[in-house]
Amino acid sequence: MAENKTQPTQVDAKDFLYTIEHKQRREDSLVLLEMMEKLTACRPVMWGTSIIGYGNYRYKYGSGRTGDWFITGFSPRKQSLTIYLMYGFDKVQKLLDRLGKHKLGKGCLYINKLTDVDMQVLEELIIATVEAHKKNDCGHY
C-alpha cells in the first residue's frame, strides 16, 4: 500500500518560517508556531515542504489503509494561513460562529491574517482538536 506523500522531515520549522517573503504571513506564522506549541505541548515538526504539524496519530480507513498524520498544524500558504484542525467542524460550530473572518475546507480553516479572528476562539478550536486526540502522545519524530 502506498505511503502518504507528505512525511515528517528534519527541517527546522522556525527556519522555514523565516523564508516566507510575505511579512504579515511570516509574522502571523511565528505567532501560530508558539501558540500551537504551547497549546499542544508538542514540538513543531515540518511535514513535507510547507506544513508544520504538532503531535501525531495513526489512522485507519475502512478500506484498511493506515498512516500517520499530525493532530493539528498549519501552513503559511500564498492565499491564506491554512490551519489543520482534523476535527469535525459540526462539533465546534458555536466557536466558528464567534471566530471572525474565515473560510472552511475539509478539516482546514483558512484565515487571511490573525487580526481577522478572535485569538481566544482560535485557541479554543485548537484545544478542541487536541482534546479529541488526547489518548495519543506527541510522538518522537
Image (spheres, rainbow, N blue to C red):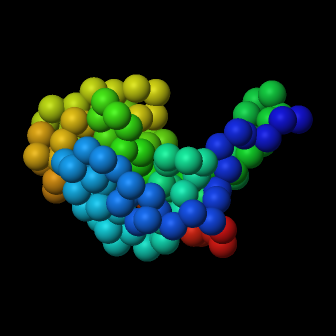
Point out the image quarter for the C terminus. bottom right
> What residue is shown at x 63% (from left), y 65% (from top)?
10
Point out the image quarter for the N terminus. top right
Would you identify the image quadrant in which residue 130 lies? bottom left
Residue 27, image x, y percentages: 22, 56
> What residue is shown at x 64% (from left), y 59% (from top)?
9
Residue 89 can be seen, yes or no = yes
Q: How many labels does the image show?
A: 0
Using residue 51 as the reference point, say whether residue 123 is left or right of it: left
Using residue 136 as the reference point, say whether residue 92 is left or right of it: left
Residue 127 can be seen, yes or no = no
Q: Residue furthest right?
A: 1
Residue 47, image x, y percentages: 58, 52
Eyeballing the image, is 134 above or below 88?
A: below
Eyeballing the image, is 4 above or below 27?
A: above
Residue 73, image x, y percentages: 44, 52
> What residue is shown at x 25% (from left), y 37% (from top)?
111
Would you identify the image quadrant in which residue 127 lies? bottom left
Which sits in the foreground, 112 or 83?
Answer: 112
Which sits in the foreground, 66 or 28?
Answer: 28
Eyeballing the image, is 101 above or below 126?
A: above
> What residue is shown at x 60% (from left), y 48% (from top)?
48
Using residue 12 as the reference point, say whether residue 30 is left or right of it: left
Residue 63, image x, y percentages: 80, 28
